Image: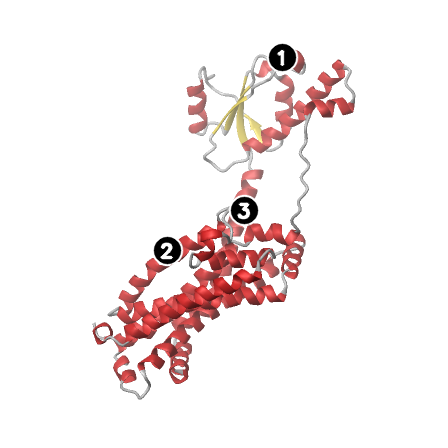
Amino acid sequence: MWLVFKKELLELLRDRKTLFFMVALPIVVFPLLFGGVTYFMSQAVSEAQTKTLNYAIIGQDYGLELVDKLAGVESLSLQSLETQPIDDEQKKTLVRDGEVDFIVEIPSNFGSDIINTGQITIKVFLNDAQFNSVQSRLSDVIDELEATYQRVAFASLGLNEDQQTGLLNPMVIEKVNVADERESIGAQVGGLIPYFLFLLCLQGAMLPAADIGAGEKERGTLETLLLSPISRQNIVLGKFLTIAFAGVISALVTVLSMAIWGIVLSQGMAIKVVSDFMASIGLLDFLLVFLMLVPIVAMFAAILLALSIYARSYKEAQGYMTPLVFLVIVPVLVAVIPGIELKGVWAWVPLTNVALAIKELIKGTMDYVQLFAIFGSSVIIAGALIAFCVHWFNKEKVLFR
């Protein structure tokens, strides 16, 4: 078994394409990809916030104070309309055609005496399908006027500051969070960590798995290996260990790479939040997280090897393995759904129970007794899949399809 493992591992290390996907891709390409997407998104947000927007006002005479406030915003440019729109459809057409970015319609009851005017409804016609900051820019101006009008109204009624506050917010909910910081952050990101870990392990194992089984068929080296004095069981186990090793290494390299790049690119508070959260997770919980991955990687390796042995060619093996990604995603995504906990039936669903256990370990709320049942059931499933893989490899009609 170990001779086969050593032989497959050496071949794996000699394959530059495999090494690129296992090492170079996670270290360089993934961080650059995520960093590039983040950079361009931040640039788009910054551009949308600073871009000068053209606008028009209908009913200027009703709200001169609002008109003056909008004129004082540097990033807004007032445009005069050649044709005054009569109905809402014409106003929508002007915005849709790009003549202006938005239109503000001031109602006739606009005024500072809100006690007599009642609620004032200001219509804003804009293209909300586009990424812009119309709403936020208008809100700053409207909120300022609203606060001023409220103070005037309260002063006329002779209300003191406490009465004003009580009138605006008669009831306030004060939230006292009994969860510590680790549990709060873990509840938000804990479900995503197993999702990425499972997919990374699967993706890292797929390429060597396709080569170890179907690839050897194409190269004609499988027959030579079968003629050796090594038993077929040991051959399968050696190949299985190679695939599992590749999956774990690929996941570890990717996670470490993203963590290092995240620390390098982040600044100030972001590093402190991440470092404080990571420091709150004990070494035992870290070890248990990776221990829970062992049977998962064993399941993936056994299934991938069985598919590779069955396939006639490398290309056919990849075709069989691709749908496996979607079969893995569904049960793991269940752990992200709010309200799904490691209780009842979910504690016995393969993959989902491990994902939920990892989430609880990250949160620091894991009942360690449950780990024995979850780990044990996962090991039994992995063992059954490995046994099936050995049985599969012993069938001549499968090996030489």
In x, y percent, where is residue 107?
Answer: 56, 15
Q: Amino acid at mark 1?
A: Thr
Q: Nearer the viewer, residue 47 or 308?
A: 308
Res. 179 in view: yes
How many tags in the picture? 3
SS at mark 1 in the image = helix
Q: Amino acid at mark 2?
A: Phe
Q: Nearer the viewer, residue 126 or 187?
A: 187
Q: Quadrant location of residue 113?
A: top right
* Residue 153 position (above or below residue 388): above
Left or right of 371 on screen, residue 140: right
Q: CA distance from mark 3 to mark 2?
A: 33 Å
**Residue under the point 51% across and 46% down:** 338
Q: Amino acid at mark 3?
A: Gln
Residue beneath disc 1: 117
Q: CA distance from mark 1 to mark 2?
A: 58 Å
Upstream in sequence: badge 1 or badge 2: 1
* Residue 39 position (above or below residue 354): above
SS at mark 3 in the image = helix
SS at mark 2 in the image = helix
Q: Nearer the viewer, residue 381 or 92?
A: 381
Q: Which mark is residue 219?
A: none
Upstream in sequence: badge 1 or badge 3: 3
Q: Quadrant location of residue 59?
A: top right
Residue beneath disc 3: 43
Residue beneath disc 2: 326
In x, y percent, where is residue 268?
Answer: 67, 54
**Residue under the point 53% across and 29% down:** 54
